[in-house]
Amino acid sequence: QVKKRPDERLGFFDAAMSFAVSERMTLERSLRDALKVGQFELFYQPQVKLKEMRLVGAEALIRWRHPELGIIGPDKFIPVAEQTGLIVEMGRWVLESACAELRSWDKQELPPLRLGVNISGRQFHEADLADTVAGVIADSGINPRQLDLELTESMLMADGESTLRLLRQLADLGVSLSIDDFGTGYSSLAYLKRFPVNTVKIDRAFVRDLDHDEDGRVIANAIISLAHSLSLSTIAEGVETESQAALLARHGCDEIQGYLIGRPVPAADFVAFARSFNGTTAIAGKS
Ligand code: C2E
Ligand code: MG
Ligand code: MG
Ligand code: MG
């Protein structure tokens, strides 16, 4: 999964590599400490139903609030967390925090929203993911229908039977399942029909192409049609312009997520956003 850096292809005793290793070990230690002292935080990005321009959900996106370096995005540390296995503990923290936030929205009397949580490959292949999710749901007391787990195509490709069993266990808990970054992985498409998934998240790459070329429109349209013909709903990711939103609406895309509606923001800012959102306002938050 994680791309090899060019320097990692050199011999074991190569200085560049031992540097990369020690750098990674330092980062790993910092990540462990950060988890312990509570430096991770979830940001929330709104998802809007295109037909009514109604706020229907959000995606939880992890950030590291580093005391010296400021806010660090997941691309900087998720790969190392994944490599070292720390992602399992971190992923559990994400699930717990996301569910706690759902509870808090309920107490603050927001309309019920669906909250998407990203699941990493390693987390998905841990033996007890379904137990973990079941436990977190029970402890938090949330309605499982409000929780959406975002999986990727590559997770669903491997080992058919046990994957199917796990997905059924998760679906039986009442949570919904989405395919994140759809169209960028090694899709066989067969799994869409076979597995109990609910939603396809159209990758930003296809949305970006919408404005530019006919091919982009053809692909987005094909994904939406395919999803709908299998009774799956669609969310377009990375929607930045009005014209992208208009094209997606014309193609029947169900929901959009992107800077056009709002950037990922801290929990308190998201609550304020949710209260004031009326379909025409958009917030400029910090990512
Ligand atoms: P993702 O799940 O596909 O999340 C969407 C990413 O697109 C987010 O980046 C979001 O900030 C960004 N984005 C949203 N709208 C726009 C837009 O209009 N334009 C542009 N240019 N970007 C937009 P972010 O937050 O940096 O997260 C990157 C990836 O890190 C995520 O991609 C996800 O794969 C991973 N990730 C984030 N949080 C978690 C987590 O809690 N657990 C795990 N395992 N992975 C996470
Ligand atoms: Mg995601
Ligand atoms: Mg995505
Ligand atoms: Mg992604």
Image (spheres, grey):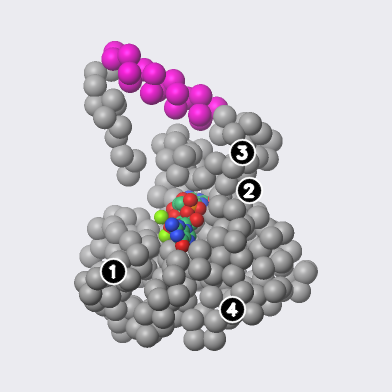
In the foreground, 53 or 98: 53
Foreground: disc 3 or disc 2: 3
Answer yes or no: do the residues labelled 3 and 1 have beta carbons within 8 Å?
A: no
**Counting residues from the N terminus, which is met first, the one under dot 2 or under dot 4?**
2
Give the residue at x 31% y 55%.
154
Circle 3 sits in a helix, a strand or a loop, which is it?
strand
Foreground: disc 4 or disc 3: 4
**Counting residues from the N terminus, which is met first, the one under dot 4 or under dot 3?**
3
The question of residue 17 being in magenta is answered with yes
The question of residue 27 being in magenta is answered with yes
Circle 1 sits in a helix, a strand or a loop, which is it?
loop
What amino acid type is highlighted by mark number 3? Gly
Q: Which residue is mark 1?
A: 212
In percent of width and height, residue 190 lies at: 25, 70
Chain part drawn in magenta: 13-29
Give the residue at x 71% y 66%.
272
Residue 181 versus residue 87 in the image, above or below: below
In the rendering, which numbered label is found on residue 41? Answer: 2
Give the residue at x 44% y 20%.
22
Q: Which residue is mark 3?
A: 70
